[in-house]
Amino acid sequence: MADNSSTTTINPYEVLKIIHNPDDTLTRNYPIPDTLSSDDPNSNDILLNPQNKTWIRIFRPTTTKLQDDDFTVTKKFPLIIYFHGGGFILCSAFSTVFHDFCKSMATHLSALVLSVEYRLAPENRLPAAYNDATDALNWVRDQALDAINGEKWLRDYADFSKCFIMGCSAGGNIAYHAGLRALEFELEPVLKISGLILNQPFFGGVERTGSELRLVNDKVLPIVMSDMMWGLALPIGADRDHFYCNPIVEIDGGTINGEKLGLMIRRCLLIGSNEDPLIDRQIEFGKMLEGKGVKVVSWIDEECYHGIVHFDQKKAEELFVVVKDFIFSTEDEP
């Protein structure tokens, strides 16, 4: 399939107001406001790795029963370990757009949401973000093991037998790779990963798909922007058929044993939209998972653009309904 991205006049560096410096760092000039956890009594920040400057922001449901000094609640909530989007190069767990999304999700789903502040590329190219995701999983397991001195909100509220790994866009890619690693770190039976929730996951490849060509000049994620993000995120010298970007190409080529995929990932909720340039890749990805024994639940919206749930509250609430059904369903439990 031909690459016609050269026909576009879009300059992704100008759109995102970033400068790629000779030392492989970015100057980020796009105004992205943050929210302090001190401004929200239902969120709390935990330092994950001082050396890497990574954090976890915990959100608990906003209800009258959960006040700062009231830890008498007996109900346990499922855990969602969440990874934000931004093409691996922008935003953080503290960005207001993701803070508000996670806060709303915690309340709508009656869940504890742990939003991970991972390292960005190109200063820290992949697999740095995957390593940070692994750190987060191991930290949650350690909390489950420490019933006396563990983080209070998790100790009092968390159902460690019902944990989900979730991400949007680049965060969906990170969530997938975190799921692949989960079996390696002996999380169970202390921490049970019950499924993945991937909202418009960010995958790519050298060969163009039909949806990428159809939406080549998409206003949110045109091909040239996607290519630029992957160029900044992947290891130096890697192309878009690297396993980090294109999980289809190397799934049985030695990078991961395809027969074990169904053991690593039991269930997956895959969310996409026909107006997202990545939709064809997401559909192909879902078929690959099913072929390896993963129970996939797909929800495809006809109209949504990439990342819409962070800017349209109505669409976010529609998403929460689908996610809640997936989390509390027992139909597909192994």
Image (cartoon, helix red, strand yellow):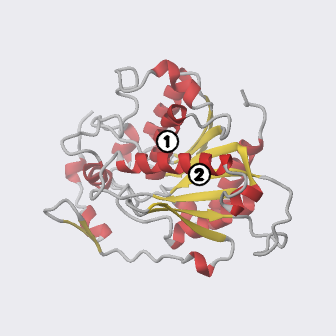
Q: In the displayed structure, does residue 202 sit left or right of residue 12?
A: right
Residue positioned most to the left: 22
Q: Nearer the viewer, residue 99 or 218?
A: 99
Q: Report which quarter residue 31 is drawn in.
A: bottom left
Which amino acid is tagged 2?
Ile
Which amino acid is tagged 1?
Ala
**In the image, residue 9 above or below residue 215:** below
Q: Report which quarter residue 316 is drawn in.
A: bottom right
Q: Which residue is mark 2?
A: 81
Q: Quadrant of the N terminus?
A: top left
Q: In the displayed structure, does residue 333 sit left or right of residue 46?
A: right
Q: Quadrant of the C terminus?
A: top right
**In the image, residue 44 above or below residue 286:** below
Q: Circle 2 sits in a helix, a strand or a loop, which is it?
A: strand
Number of numbered callouts drawn: 2
* Residue 47 visible from this viewpoint: yes
What numbered label is drawn on residue 178? 1
Question: x, y percentage for residue 19?
Answer: 22, 68
Q: Circle 1 sits in a helix, a strand or a loop, which is it?
A: helix
Q: Residues within 10 Å of mark 2 (few under 14, many from 20)?
A: many
- Which residue occupies 54% across, 31% down? 183
Circles 1 and 2: CB atoms closer than 8 Å:
yes
Q: Residues within 10 Å of mark 1 (few under 14, many from 20)?
A: many
Question: x, y percentage for residue 167?
Answer: 53, 50
**Mark 1 and mark 2: Cα distance apart in space:** 10 Å
Question: x, y percentage for residue 17?
Answer: 28, 71
- Which residue occupies 50% across, 48% down? 200
